[in-house]
Image (tube, rainbow, N blue to C red):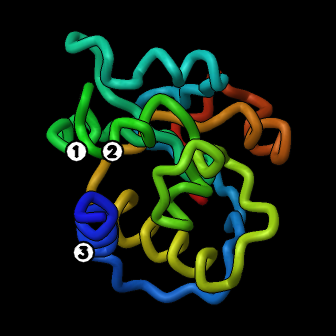
C-alpha cells in the first residue's frame, strides 16, 4: 500500500495543468535536430532497465521518454520498473501497477483517470524527461505527419 501512495506522490508531485479529456493533441512536426525514432513494442522492451548500460525508456500516450534520470524509481528491481520498456499509458492514468493495466489501451477509462493521465503526461513527463521517440501506433494513426521520417526531427503532440 505504501508503494502505491508513493507512486501517487511521485507521479503527481508537479502536475498542475488541467485537461478535461484524454485526447491526443494535433501532431505538429517541428525541427530540433535529431531525427525522430519510431519504436515498436519489441524495440521499446530493450530499454526496460534490465541492462545497466542501456538507458531506461517509458512510453506514455505514444511518446517515448528517457526516464534514466529517475533510475531509483524505474531501474531494475525499483518500485516502478513495471512501467518501463512498454507504453504504460493505462497504468499511468489509473496510477496502477497491476499487470492488466500495463498497456497503452485506454478503452473504458473514467474521466477522472483520463484527466489524471493528461495532467501527469504534461506536468511530469513532458516537463521532466526528454522525448526520445514515438510508438509505431502513432505513425499508423497520423501517417501524413510521419511521411518523411528522414527529415522529421520532432513531433509535437
**Pointer 2: what residue?**
80
Q: Residue at x 46, y 15 (%)?
A: 46
Q: Nearer the viewer, residue 138 or 72?
A: 72
The x and y percentages for residue 20 are 63, 89
Q: Considering the numbered disc 2 on the image, is that residue within a helix, a strand or a loop? A: loop
Q: Considering the numbered disc 3 on the image, is that residue within a helix, a strand or a loop? A: loop
Q: Nearer the viewer, residue 112 or 100?
A: 100
**Pointer 1: what residue?**
73
Instruction: Determine contact: label 2, label 1, CB under 8 Å.
Output: yes
In the shown orientation, is residue 40 left or right of residue 144? left
- Marks 2 and 1, the one that precedes in the sequence: 1
Q: Residue 17 is drawn in which quadrant? A: bottom left
Q: Nearer the viewer, mark 3 or mark 2?
A: 2
**Pointer 3: what residue?**
13
- Marks 3 and 1, the one that precedes in the sequence: 3
Q: Nearer the viewer, residue 144 or 107?
A: 107
Amino acid at each position: 500500500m505504501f508503494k502505491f501512495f508513493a507512486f501517487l506522490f511521485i507521479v503527481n508531485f508537479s502536475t498542475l495543468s488541467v485537461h478535461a479529456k484524454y485526447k491526443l493533441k494535433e501532431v505538429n512536426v517541428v525541427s530540433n535536430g535529431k531525427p525522430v525514432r519510431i519504436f515498436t513494442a519489441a524495440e521499446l522492451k530493450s530499454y526496460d532497465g534490465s541492462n545497466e548500460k542501456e538507458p531506461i525508456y517509458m512510453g506514455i500516450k505514444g511518446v517515448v521518454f528517457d526516464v534514466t534520470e529517475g533510475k531509483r524509481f524505474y531501474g531494475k528491481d525499483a518500485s516502478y520498473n513495471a512501467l518501463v520498456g512498454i507504453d504504460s499509458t493505462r497504468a499511468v492514468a489509473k496510477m496502477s501497477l497491476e499487470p492488466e493495466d500495463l498497456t497503452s489501451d485506454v478503452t473504458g477509462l473514467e474521466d477522472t483517470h483520463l484527466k489524471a493521465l493528461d495532467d501527469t503526461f504534461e506536468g511530469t513527463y513532458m516537463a521532466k524527461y526528454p522525448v526520445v521517440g514515438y510508438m509505431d501506433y502513432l505513425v499508423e494513426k497520423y501517417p501524413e505527419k510521419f511521411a518523411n521520417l528522414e527529415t522529421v526531427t520532432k513531433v509535437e503532440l
